[in-house]
Amino acid sequence: MSITVTDIYRYPVKSMAGDRLQRVTLSGNGVPGDRCWTLKDEERGGIKGGKRFPGIMSMHAELLAEPSSEAPSPPARITLPDGSQMITTDADINHRLSNAVGAPVSIWPLLPADQLEHYQRTPPPEGVDQEAALREVFARTEDEPLPDLSLFPEALFSYESPPGTYFDAFPLLILSQSALDAMAAAAPNNFDVRRFRPNIVVDTPENGFVEDGWAGRTARLGAATLKLEMACPRCVMTTHGFADLPKDPGIMRALVANNDGNLGLYASVMEGGDISVGDTLTLE
């Protein structure tokens, strides 16, 4: 079975749109510069993305320099839907982003993993129980099962992201075109790859949600070795309207009905190395 990389994406600011890359050198934290900036909620606290502030999904972020070990979060240019731009290092960046989002926010580069307070998970708002909060995050109705949280990294029960990163769970998200095609056939409207923010899109001769069966295996991709971790449970962020895509709660209804609410596969990097569009992913 030939599995070929068709697209590589990087999203410099968590939940903002990013750009395609032709090649990249994967590190232990995935694509260098991916999710190297994030917003924090100055009202409720905590690292927050499109789940809390859907408006940022219509913003675009572009790195102005490549990251390095000394500067893992180089400056990024943010373009708002009206075409106005700002740089993450601008003195008034927090004021302008707060105005654009409609809530008090601040933007942060990656901080060292030992600064645990920065990554601390905030409790649900007063009066909201844990299950209700989870159903809101994962956009699940009362009669739909929640994802199996035991599969997630243990750190996520205490922190908004694994400390030292701004990923939701793991450094990489792999998505097959066949899975996207399966959902587009099941629910034709609005199944656009932009909703799902993959790092790597692959083409495979098999149909359907083929990547779900790869969980637990290792794979070679270019000069890198990956550990294929778990299917990616999708959340409310996929249903938000942004750019030219309308709000569509039916996205999650279709995902739950057709693939238990999952789309794509989380992966981590066992051995870094160069990967390129056109490379073959080889399961081991």
Image (cartoon, rainbow, N blue to C red):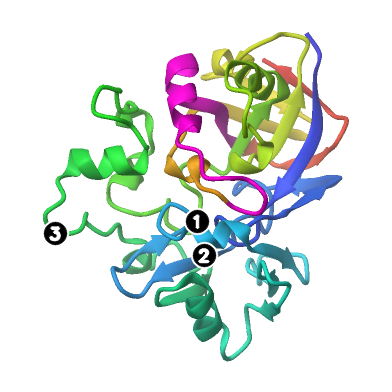
Identify which residue, 122 or 208, lies in the foreground.
208
The residue depicted at 23 percent of the width and 28 percent of the height is 142
**Residue lying farthest left?**
127
Residue picked out by circle 2: 38
The residue depicted at 63 percent of the width and 83 percent of the height is 89
Q: Position of residue 90 (x, y in %)?
A: 63, 87
Nearer the observer: mark 3 or 2; the answer is 3
The answer, for residue 251, to whether it is visible in the render is: yes
Disc 3 and disc 2 in contact, CB within 8 angstroms: no
Disc 1 and disc 3 in contact, CB within 8 angstroms: no
Q: Position of residue 143 (x, y in %)?
A: 25, 22
Q: As displayed, is residue 83 above or below residue 152?
A: below
Q: Amino acid at mark 2?
A: Thr
The answer, for residue 233, to whether it is visible in the render is: no
Residue stretch in magenta = 242-269
The quadrant of the rendering that contains the N terminus is top right
Disc 1 and disc 2 in contact, CB within 8 angstroms: yes
**Residue 166, numbered label:** 1
